[in-house]
């Protein structure tokens, strides 16, 4: 990556981490208050997204250090080719469950 985009990458990743933390907190709060199971699925997907974002942040912050720590790109490959699709699948399942619940429980709309 180009050095001139270093700070932009860090800012974008900091925003991503912040949004993932917010999402995990929001769905955790919703689950605690309602005990609806789809909220728990969305908590797990938010935490998974946070983990993927933290791996991306490590690569963006210090690529040489991460390459030294993980020369075979095992962490990168696992997080982006295994965890990320599973997180997307969990999020889609939780959101679908949410929509079905909302449509079944709407009153007078």
Image (spheres, rainbow, N blue to C red):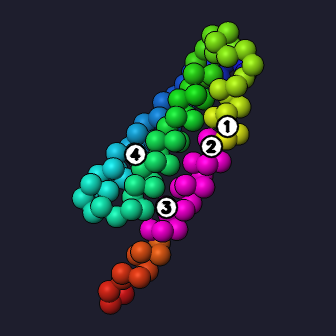
Is 42 situated left or right of 25 in this image?
Answer: right
Q: Residue 80: horizontal and vertical position, in percent?
A: 67, 37
Q: Earlier in the sequence, mark 4 or mark 2?
A: 4
Mark 2 surroundings: few (<14), some (14-19) or many (≥20) residues within 10 A? some
Q: How far apart are labels 4 and 2 at the CA level?
A: 16 Å
The span shown in magenta is 83-98
**Residue occupied by mark 4:** 24
User: Which structural element holds mark 3?
Assistant: helix
**Residue occupied by mark 3:** 94
Residue at screen point 32% across, 86% down:
107
**Residue occupied by mark 2:** 84
Mark 3 surroundings: few (<14), some (14-19) or many (≥20) residues within 10 A? many
Q: How far apart are labels 1 and 2 at the CA level?
A: 5 Å
Q: Earlier in the sequence, mark 2 or mark 3?
A: 2
Residue at screen point 36% across, 82% down:
106
Numbered label tally: 4
- Residue 84 found in image quarter: top right
Q: Is residue 30 above or below residue 57?
A: below
Q: Residue 103: horizontal and vertical position, in percent?
A: 43, 80
**Residue occupied by mark 1:** 80
Is 85 situated left or right of 20 in this image?
Answer: right
Q: Earlier in the sequence, mark 1 or mark 3?
A: 1
Q: How far apart are labels 4 and 3 at the CA level?
A: 13 Å
| View extreme (left): residue | 33
């Amino acid at each position: 990556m180009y050095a001139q985009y270093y700070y932009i990458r860090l800012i974008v990743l900091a925003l991503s981490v912040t949004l993932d933390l917010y999402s995990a907190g929001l769905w955790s709060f919703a689950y605690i208050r309602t005990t609806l199971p789809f909220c728990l699925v969305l908590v797990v997907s938010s935490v998974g997204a946070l983990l993927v974002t933290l791996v991306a942040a490590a690569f963006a912050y210090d690529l040489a250090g991460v390459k030294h720590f993980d020369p075979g790109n095992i962490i990168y490959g696992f997080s982006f080719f295994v965890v990320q699709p599973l997180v997307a699948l969990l999020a889609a399942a939780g959101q679908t469950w949410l929509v079905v619940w909302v449509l079944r429980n709407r009153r007078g709309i």
